[in-house]
Image (spheres, rainbow, N blue to C red):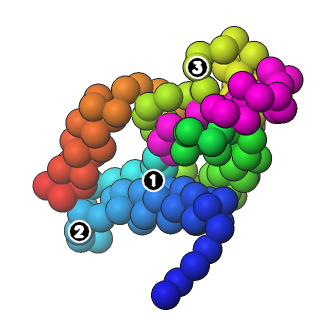
Amino acid sequence: MFTTSRRSFMKSSIVLGAGLSLGVAGCGGSSAGSLQSKTKFAVLSDPHVYDSSLGTSGEAFEDYLSHDRKMLLESVEILEEMVADFLTTDGLEFVIIPGDLTKDGERVCHEKMVSILKPLLEKKVLMYMSSQVITILIILMLLLLTVV
């Protein structure tokens, strides 16, 4: 039996998912002289960024954490680590961020997310943020284009 902490599992899952996304991009075969180009992209789903300035203690907050799987207290650290990984990925052209960007849409959480993503924008990495359904369609389209 393999045991791990929830934090380690979630962090590994995010890293693995991003790694797989980077590896799958451009998987279509092409010969030397072909006009096909390879695209490198990453997927970072449902970051649920939570700014700790909104509070990290109290009965209501503890009750919320006990009934929810989101890693709110670690969300900023996880996103920062993912952005750092993306910044060191050669040739990364864009990042798809489907799903919920913040805990509940709080302005301060959106501002925190923008501040963390800013280095990617400065490096000219495009970002697409959308609902899960639209993102799945975009990813399928990209994968189909790389196979054709």
Q: Is residue 30 above or below residue 107?
A: below
- N-term-proximal mark, 1 vs 3: 1
Q: Can you tell which mark lies on residue 29?
A: 2
| Residue that protrudes farthest toward the bottom in the picture | 1
Quarter of the image for residue 67 reads: top right
The percent coordinates of residue 75 (x first, y second) are 69, 42
Distance between the Cα atoms at labels 1 and 2?
A: 15 Å
Q: Secondary structure at mark 3?
A: loop
Pointer 3 and pointer 2: residues touching (CB < 8 Å)? no
Instruction: Name the kind of residue labelled 1 in the image.
Output: Lys
Pointer 1 and pointer 3: residues touching (CB < 8 Å)? no
Residue 80: tell me if it is visible: no
Instruction: Name the kind of residue labelled 3 in the image.
Output: Asp
Q: Is residue 36 above or below residue 104?
A: below
Give me the residue at 53% from left, 84% from top.
2
Q: In the rendered image, which residue does mark 3 sit on?
A: 104
Give me the residue at 50% from left, 28% from top.
100
Q: Is residue 19 above or below residue 94?
A: below
Q: Is residue 128 above or below residue 19?
A: above
Disc number lying in front (1 or 2): 1
The percent coordinates of residue 68 (x first, y second) are 55, 39
Name the image quarter holding the C terminus: bottom left
The magenta span reads 44-64
| Residue that protrudes farthest toward the top in the picture | 107
Q: Secondary structure at mark 2?
A: loop
Q: In the rendered image, which residue does mark 1 sit on?
A: 40
